[in-house]
Amino acid sequence: MRTLHRKLWRELWNLRWQALAIALVMACGVAMVIMSLSTLDSLERTRGDYYERHGFPDVFAPVKRAPNSLVARLAVLPGVAHVEARVVATVSLDVRGLSEPATGRLISLPDSGSPRLNTLHLRQGRLLDPGRTGEVLLAEAFAAAHHLEPGDSLRAVINGRLKELRVVGVVLSPEYIYSVRPGEILPDDKRFGVLWMGYRELSAAFDLDGAFNDLVVKLRSGASEADVIQRIDRMLGPHGGIGAHGRADQASYRFLENEMIQLRAMASLPPLIFLSVTSFLMQVVFSRLVATQREQIATLRAFGYTRGEIGRHFLLFAAVITAVGTIGGIALGMQLGYDLTVLYVRFFRFPTLQYQLDPLIALLAATVSALSALFGVWSAVWRAVREPPAQAMQPEAPARFHASLLEGWGLRRLLSPTSRMILRNIERQPLRTAFSSLGIALAIGILVLGNFTEDTVDHVMNIQFNEVARQDMMVSFVEPTSAAARHNLSQLPGVLTVEPYRVAPARLRFGSKSRRLAIMGLDSPARLYRPLEAAQRPVALPDDGLVISRKLAEVLACERGDVLRVEVLEQARPVRHVAVREIIDDYLELNAYMNRKALHRLLREQDAISGAFLAVDDNQTDRLYRELKAIPRVAGVTVQRFALESYRRTLAENILRMKAINVFFASVVALGVVYNGARVTLAERSRELASLRVLGFTRGEISRILFGELTLVVLLAIPLGCVVGYLFASILTASLNTEVHRFPLLVRRETYLFATSVTVVAACLSGLAVRHRLHRLDLVSVLKARD
């Protein structure tokens, strides 16, 4: 073994705990990269393969009623590869063991052959038998929530008639990998399910024989989606087309895409923080190593070792630490990525969702970690190879001590000798003190970053479920109906208040920008559902004009007072120009509100409603549920209490898991920074501390000197860490600002307290580890000074 290699392994062993601390911090950064990117890659590969094999459409086009003869004309449009027409209907379901009505979406299947688009994946049972009636296929999520299997039955109100349906198969569909009820943001598999029925039976039930009300289209490679959508809308318009849209507006695709945006954000900011801390730790340790080995380096140069060999020696030292951290980080990242993938399996229904690590991702993580390490050690290595041997053989000039600032302010008498030593050493090395404080501040910032989401989610839940949507339940109708339905609802048992609403699908345009959404018409003032402005005060909907989300205003690049082109996508499809009267901050989806009377005028219709918000007597909910199940026009019932429970249940597990990961990672950073700083301080001041022991200072007194410096560094880091955490939270909040979710920048005092407490505990543990070494200090060997 070469001399330099023996020296390397000896030094690695002597500095094993410091090297391990650095490797652990590096492993955290690498693990975050691997976890996020590998999970993202697995989701993208799985989704792409599933969509390709099962024919996920590119364009979706709902319509009121169109003849099947129109399909042949649509199929020959430029850019269209394949077209399939079907019947889709929303129904009320009566499921055994569920008191409240569930919402079902019935979709037709061809009576002969299999569809080429949205091909179903059979999980249990069999496919439909064209010769039998009353058979349905059931989506796996709904079946699992109710423990339904082939052979079981449930009842549905189909076009006003209660019908018994027998489940013959449990399936998955690429259209519903994320099954969410319209108007909601999280799946409620217990109260929303998708069912498939033969075309002949379903079309007859809804008086659509020889017709369809929904179209799915596959495009040719290179076709213009916008051009095809325009042509489809032109052809379906006379038949009540509601406006075709692409994948980006399909609920399941959009929610999964939003999740991928969040994964990309996780793969950028947190790893950058960890690897920055790694560079800092490398710089501290290697600067100290080179400084204490000046004489050894000079001796090696005198014996003929070149600058390149010495430089490679120190770089190899860093490479060993980097390799350990990278390998450990890849292993940890793979485990975390697998766990995260398993978590996604619960939300996204794929036939298979197998976790895999692309070697390119591992190579990327290794390259980034190597560059961060190189950045940290480069200055120290450069100093080691550039210093002339004759100069390196001489001892370093002794440090110049002087009175501290507090002593200069006349406070000398108030400071003990120990306190003066601590302050003077802190002031003598301001850069090292600043960098040590910054490293600990980053640990606090990571904890704030990992825990502020709990604050924001609680805030969003409180605003959405207690301030905006204050109803007990929301009833939606199959199609807009007369305002007399309001009176009918008010007569149901337990109903205390009824506030109707009108929803109109529309495409809003401003300049070259456009978005497809539903305009909600509300009474003003309203008590049960109230859009809020920034100060959380209810918005008074104007007599005319729109109130829109700030995010929608950003997407359309419009401002208050601008006039939008509103293309209504139902009935006569009128086109109007409506001014933006108010822009509000909200957190879920893109929203546009109007006064209900103004919306009626825009639609040129009489008083019609799409549903109503209800306040009910809790003691009569069971009777109310039974009545609602029997009303033919009711398409769905959303119970606010259950929606809130689903929201909490879904997010609580995610937040708890990510909080645990961030606490672990931040504790590693705090331990790594504090332990390395304390070890470096002990190594640099060992002779001074040993001298004090000889002069009669006790172990406790010299421990107070070392820990006093450590305490000051931590105290300086706490306010800086809170500022850094707020900055990190603002960056992450901006990156997660999507059309599906917006999170306010809200960090509570409890979050700062928690982050500070965890960091202080980590610092105490590091101090105890160094204290053990301090008490074992060999006074004789340490006091052997070099002449």
Image (cartoon, rainbow, N blue to C red):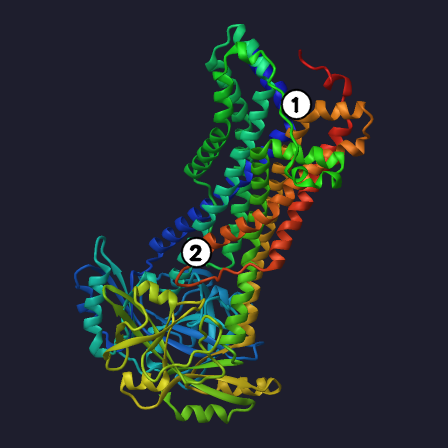
Taking 62 as reference, is 351 above or below it?
A: above
Q: Can you give x and y, in whole percent of width and height, for residue 446 in the image?
A: 55, 48
Tell me the quarter of the picture where residue 225 sits.
bottom left
For the residue pair 97 and 538, the one nearer the viewer reads as 538
Residue 141 visible, this orientation: yes
Disc 1 residue type (three-letter): Asn
Residue 694 is tagged as: none
Instruction: First in sequence, mark 1 or 2: give its number.
Output: 1
Q: Can you give x and y, in whole percent of width and height, for residue 582 in the image?
A: 36, 74
Residue 14 is tagged as: 1
| Left or right of 374, for residue 236 | left
For the residue pair 296 and 214, the one nearer the viewer reads as 296
Image quadrant holding the C terminus, namely: top right
Q: Nearer the viewer, mark 1 or mark 2?
A: 2
Taking 784 as reference, is 746 above or below it?
A: below
Residue 654 visible, this orientation: no
Tell me the quarter of the picture where residue 410 sits.
top right
Residue 734 is tagged as: 2
Disc 1 residue crowd, few under 14, some 14–19, many 20+, Cα 10 Å: few
Image quadrant holding the N terminus, namely: top right
Q: Residue at x 33, y 81 (%)?
A: 204
For the residue pair 508 and 198, the one nearer the viewer reads as 508
Q: Residue at x 46, y 59 (%)?
A: 349
Tell me the quarter of the picture where residue 112 sits.
bottom left
Taking 50 as reference, is 197 above or below it?
A: below
Q: Residue at x 56, y 89 (%)?
A: 494
Disc 2 residue crowd, few under 14, some 14–19, many 20+, Cα 10 Å: some
Which structural element holds mark 2?
helix
The CA distance from mark 1 to mark 2 is 45 Å
Q: Can you give x and y, in whole percent of width and height, for residue 134 in the image?
A: 43, 77
Q: Residue at x 70, y 15 (%)?
A: 785
